Image (cartoon, rainbow, N blue to C red):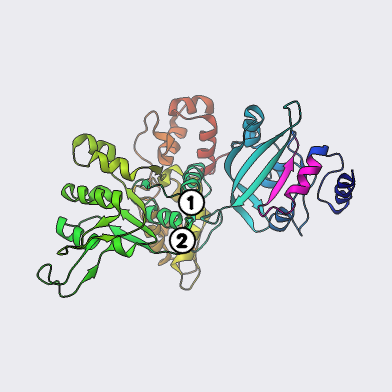
Amino acid sequence: MAVLVTLRQAIFIGTVMPEAHPLILALVSYLEHDALPTIVLDTDYNILAANAAYRRQFGHDEQAPLGEKCHRVSHHYAVPCDQAGEHCPMRKAWASKEPERVLHIHHTPRGPEHVDVELRPILDEQGRVVAFVERLTSIALASAQPQQQGLVGRAPAFKTALASLQRAAPAQIPVLLQGESGTGKELFARAIHLGSPRANGPLVVVDCTGLTESLFESELFGYEKGAFTGANQRKVGLAEAAHGGTLFLDEIGEVPLAMQVKLLRLIESGSFRPVGSLRTVHADFRLVSATHKPLKQMVAEGTFREDLYYRISGFPIRLPALRERVEDLPLLAESLLQRMGGPPAVSLTEAALTQLRLHTFPGNIRELRNILERARLFADDGLIRPEHLPDDVGQPLPATTRGRGRNDLGGLALALEQFQGSRSELARHLGLSERTLYRRLKALGLN
């Protein structure tokens, strides 16, 4: 009883709602000194309590938003997340009575941030859900705001890839990054390394493109002095240099077939012999690979070893093309312009941004960076206008077919102009959900 009296006194300093269930009062006492920001919710989305870590990190002036709806505080939504196009862990946890985890973008005193949300239901003696405990972990591996380095994005396709990255980074499992050229595979690999226990070790990048069999072997495994003509001194291989850190094999689909068996042996045993040496070297590294090639198809064609494929693809992550995350164009453009540096500061006009939204970006983010680098040279007053963009940017395609509007804003703009019917009928014609069509239309600047 004395414990409850003490806890009820805590009501007056703003940590828990007065009408809280006795189970919740005991829970708040337990969670108060938890290192992770934590809130307690009732079954109607109201915030009943918040611990000290939450008040410091997410509270305004270190005050908890008690009595407010969680979706209004975190997302500024008037309705629950699932009614606003987001995944709502509460609905799933209510039904399953099991913990649920999801990645959201939360509004914080520092602006929007990616947050890993873990929600656990609290059951009473009869097994009924009486409340939820929500733990929040801010993700430092990516930003939802413009920044001068690292991953940035807010689009659903980007958040899906980021959620997978967040799961994989702390583990030792080999990761295979798959995506078109220019989608940021090396940035994702660096984020995985920084989110791993090996973050203080080296990240060694091996570019597998254009390497002959002999050159690939000497680069990866190193060589002894006198191993071949021109080998005037011993060279440490990249595999040995990655000891204690991460080895990133970029464009692994380019590795010569004859070298794949040696690569497989390296990955399985961590051991290898430098060229021209009889000694065996052991390297302890975490493996991350990347490719834009269809490795499964290459396995079927016999150009990529099946055993190697399954060894490197323990945790595959698909990176979205830029046309799949067109909502991120303003954020990416601002970040890229910041990274270019140098006076004067340059920004995009709304007209130029609208024209960029109509482009399909076959070269993805790399192409966007090249376009912006060129355009800023014409922006004498610091503003990039449509006339500063290349002539082929923003030109709609000549025709559209069913399903093309899924990722092609140029095709969608043309379909919208030509299609006679309602938006729901247009969505069915394009093979999209109405919600996805709405996002695409919003990206085009249409209500």
In the image shown, does 2 or 373 lie closer to the viewer?
A: 2
Marks 2 and 1: CB-CB under 8 Å?
A: no
Whether residue 444 can be seen here: no
Q: Amino acid at mark 2?
A: Ala
Circle 2: is it few (<14), some (14-19), or many (20+) Cα within 10 Å? some
Res. 75 image quadrant: top right
Could you tell me residue 177's position as x and y percent?
37, 47
Counting from the top left corner in percent of width and height, residue 244 is at: 39, 61
Q: What range is drawn magenta here?
A: 24-42
- Is 153 left or right of 181, judged from the image as shown? right
Asked whether residue 4 appears in the rendered view, the answer is: yes
* Vertical order, 315 against 406 (above or below): below
Residue at the image position 70 percent from the left and 55 percent from the top: 53
Q: CA distance from mark 2 to mark 1?
A: 10 Å
Numbered circle sitting on residue 199:
2
Q: What residue is pinned by disc 1?
A: 170
Amino acid type at circle 1 is Pro
Query: Does 40 lie within the magenta span?
Result: yes
Pick the front one: 416 or 2: 2
Q: Residue at x 9, y 70 (%)?
A: 229
Q: Residue furthest left?
A: 229
Extreme residue toward the front, this view: 279
Residue at (53% x, 39% y) in the render: 439
| Front-lying residue, 142 or 415 | 142
Give percent across and percent down for residue 255.
Answer: 22, 50
